[in-house]
Image: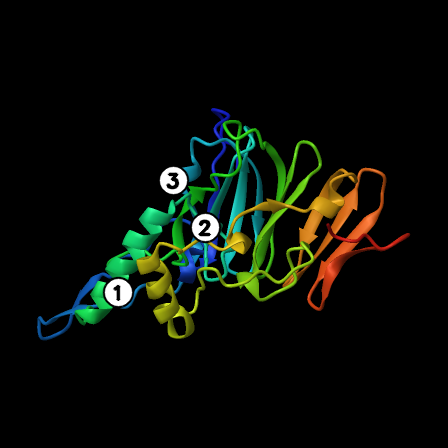
Amino acid sequence: METTSSKREVLAWGVVSHGRLGTGKPQREVEINFFGNRKLKDPKRYDSEPSIIPRLTDKNIVGISAGTDHALALSDSGEVFAWGSNSLGQCGVIDLDPLHLRRIELQRHRDRYNGTKEDKAPNLWDDVWLPRIIPQFGPSTGVVIKSVSAGGIHSAAIDRNGLVYTWGGGGNSNCLGHGEISSYEFGNSEKNDSLRRQVLAMSGHLRIPKWAIPRSIKSLKEDKISQISLGRAHCAAVSSTGSIFVWGDETMEIQKVRGRWIENE
């Protein structure tokens, strides 16, 4: 939406859960019953009236893409913002050094040991309720994005040179197009990876998994991609010369629809 003052505003409506709308975590209201007793009402599940996403008001958004339960927005300066579910890294992660990761994980361990119901320390895979910038993109990094696409469990972006960047998928899917299944260097499953993460944290070997960080697809480097579209767990891209490439689900390699197969480096 563009107002008379030429300020672009992004509006969202629909399901509230997992931060899909980017308008912040809803507050629980107090309800007073007939007898005067106070009770906390459950947060609203839907918002049928469009609401402005405040954090994007001054960003001059020129592109937006909504996935299954997360979304991406692109500013005119080539920055990318993400919000919604980040359970599989589809919103990307903030830049954290190993020492910071260690402090976070050790604090989470202490919270669990002390019987805290909810971890006070942030989780890298928490829902993103307000749009946050993906630090790998923007003029300051030299990677200026011109197009974004949000899928079911992953995300993609195209820079001004036609390079494709993908991230998300949780490390157990072939939807990123890198010809590999990334290992769980950090892990996003509390039950399976909690002890392993504690050991890695205490030893100083905890690392953010590469599948949660945007990476360029090397095998498409020479093709100058102009458009990309993401499905539930697959992708399709079109080059400036009209060639179509597809990948995802059971196929790790990127397949060229017309012509030869492209082998990943």
Q: Residue most toward the top?
A: 5
- Amino acid type assigned to the residue bearing label 3 in the image: Pro
Q: Along the line of sight, which residue is nearer the eye, 260 or 3? A: 260
Q: Amino acid at mark 2?
A: Trp
Q: Nearer the viewer, residue 201 or 52?
A: 201
From the top left corner, tell me how far across and down residue 63 is, in percent. Answer: 58, 39
The answer to whether any part of residue 246 appears in the image is yes
Residue highlighted by disc 3: 54
Q: Position of residue 153 (x, y in %)?
A: 56, 61
The mark that comes first in sequence, 2 or 1, is 2
* 29 left or right of 1 in image: left
List x then y, in percent, for residue 26: 31, 56
In space, the residues marked 1 and 3 are separated at their CA atoms by 35 Å
Expressed as whole percent of the image width and height from the top left, the position of residue 246 reads: 76, 56
Instruction: Read off the residue under disc 2.
Output: 83
- Mark on residue 109? 1
Q: Do the residues under discs 1 and 3 have CB atoms within 8 angstroms?
A: no
Tag 3 secondary structure: helix
In this orientation, does residue 117 appear? no
Could you tell me the amino acid type at mark 1?
His
Mark 3 crowdedness (10 Å alpha carbons): few <14, some 14-19, many ≥20: some
Q: Nearer the viewer, mark 2 or mark 3?
A: 2
Task: Return the disc, 1 or 3, that comes first in the chain's sequence.
Answer: 3
Give the left or right position of residue 172, taking residue 246 as reference: left
Tell me what residue is drawn at x 46 percent, y 62 percent.
Answer: 87
Q: Residue at x 54, y 28 (%)?
A: 77
